[in-house]
Amino acid sequence: MTQTLTQADLIQFDSPAHRVHISWRDRAYELSYWTDAGIEKENLLQKVMDLLLSCKYFIAMDQGWSDWDLEIYQGIWSKVQLKVCTENHGGNKRVLRVRCALRMSQLAIMAIVGYCLFAIVAIVLGMPEVATVTIAAGMLNTAFILYQNFQLGRILYQVLEIIAKKVYLLPIQPNSNNSVAQKP
């Protein structure tokens, strides 16, 4: 029996090849890679799309106005916004900086807001039992959404590591807590 990236619970994830810079405030993590082969960000993005599309992930490409290059969806609850920046260091020497921001889908946000509104209405109308059940269901759904986001983040990390090994990208260890791909 083979495993696919859509069966996240079955995957035996490798331990991180290098230290990942995590920004809890932005719900994102960053990876950096060095190459002497002149690999550009478009090459990396295409390889990510090829691998994920073969596993039935829905991918939206930036049309030039977004703060991300790819938006990758897993199911109806979670998505990752992937951004890649290239630093040219002369000749074919490049540093590729990858930022993966974990986000809830619009449906997930609407579901959580719906639970909150329904619970408030139930409390106002004097139905504490209905409010309690709604709050419990909302908390369970929120926990499931957060779990799905975490799983998608782990999957995308593994995808990036697989691709980095295939195209001989060398991981760069971050030396500070400052984000490289932060907005100005």
Image (tube, rainbow, N blue to C red):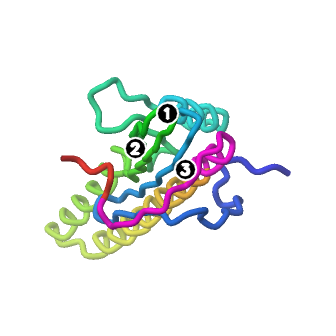
Left or right of 59? Residue 7 is right
Q: Report the amino acid beneath label 2.
A: Gln
- Position of residue 56 relative to residue 32, above or below, is above
Instruction: State the SS at label 3.
Output: helix
Q: Quadrant of residue 87?
A: top left
Classed neighbour count for the residue bearing mark 1: other residues with Cα under 10 Å, few (<14), some (14–19), many (≥20):
some
What residue did someone put label 2 on? 81
Left or right of 112? Residue 39 is right
Q: Which labelled disc corresponds to residue 59?
A: 1
Residue at the spot 40% in from the left edge and 49% down from the top edge: 99
Residue at the spot 81% in from the left edge and 49% down from the top edge: 2
What residue did someone put label 3 on? 156
Q: Report the amino acid beneath label 1.
A: Ile
Outermost residue on the right side: it is 1
Which residues fall within the magenta stretch?
A: 159-178
- Position of residue 33 relative to residue 118, above or below, is above
**Do the residues bearing badges 1 and 2 touch, measured as CB atoms within 8 Å?**
no
Q: Position of residue 83 (x, y in %)?
A: 39, 41
